[in-house]
Image (cartoon, rainbow, N blue to C red):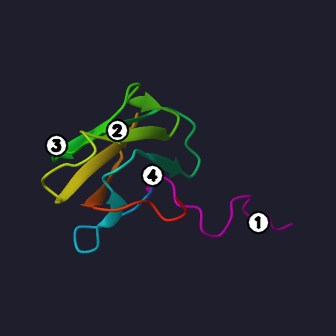
């Protein structure tokens, strides 16, 4: 009798997937005019995540910083004079982490 695994073929434990997900070479453009929601998902993980801004001072993760995987991130004022790239790190309770790179842009969000 042969048994097959119950997990899907692309199961990837210990990897946190963020949305928006920007990289250092291709940061996610986010309008500085309003807040956005950061989401985190990790296959097979049901615990809490913590989010922290680790570089930059235009975006702030609102409390609670420890959640099941969703945070409101707000700009410091409606116009931050530095439209630069900032970094937000999300860490699970096992010590795995992922970082998203956010590039502040002027203008409105699409669909507004």
Secondary structure of residue under mark 4: loop
| Mark 1–mark 4 distance (CA, rounded to whole Å) | 22 Å
Disc assigned to residue 65: none
Q: Which residue is mark 1?
A: 4
Q: Which tag is nearer the camera, tag 2 or tag 3?
A: 3
- First-in-chain label (3 vs 4): 4
Distance, label 2 to label 3, CA atoms, is 15 Å
- Residue on which the image places disc 2: 51
Residue 82, position as x, y percentages in the image: 13, 55
Instruction: State left or right for residue 111 relative to residue 107.
Output: right
Q: Say left or right for 50 vs 39.
A: left
Earlier in the chain: of badge 1 and badge 4, it is 1
In this rendering, the count of numbered labels is 4
Of marks 2 and 4, which one's residue comes earlier in the chain? 4
| Magenta residue span | 1-18
Is residue 62 magenta-colored?
no
Residue occupied by mark 4: 14
Q: Residue at x 55, y 42 (%)?
A: 45
What is the secondary structure assignment of the residue under circle 1? loop
């Amino acid at each position: 009798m042969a048994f097959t695994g119950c997990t899907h073929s692309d199961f990837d434990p210990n990897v946190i997937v963020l949305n928006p997900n920007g990289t250092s070479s291709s940061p996610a453009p986010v309008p500085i005019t309003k807040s956005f929601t950061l989401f985190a998902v990790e296959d097979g993980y049901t615990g809490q995540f913590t989010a922290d801004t680790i570089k930059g001072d235009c975006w702030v993760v609102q409390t609670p910083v420890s959640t099941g995987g969703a945070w409101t991130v707000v700009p410091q004022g409606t116009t931050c004079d530095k439209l630069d790239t900032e970094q937000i790190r999300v860490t699970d309770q096992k010590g795995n982490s992922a970082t998203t790179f956010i590039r502040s842009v002027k203008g409105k969000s699409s669909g507004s």
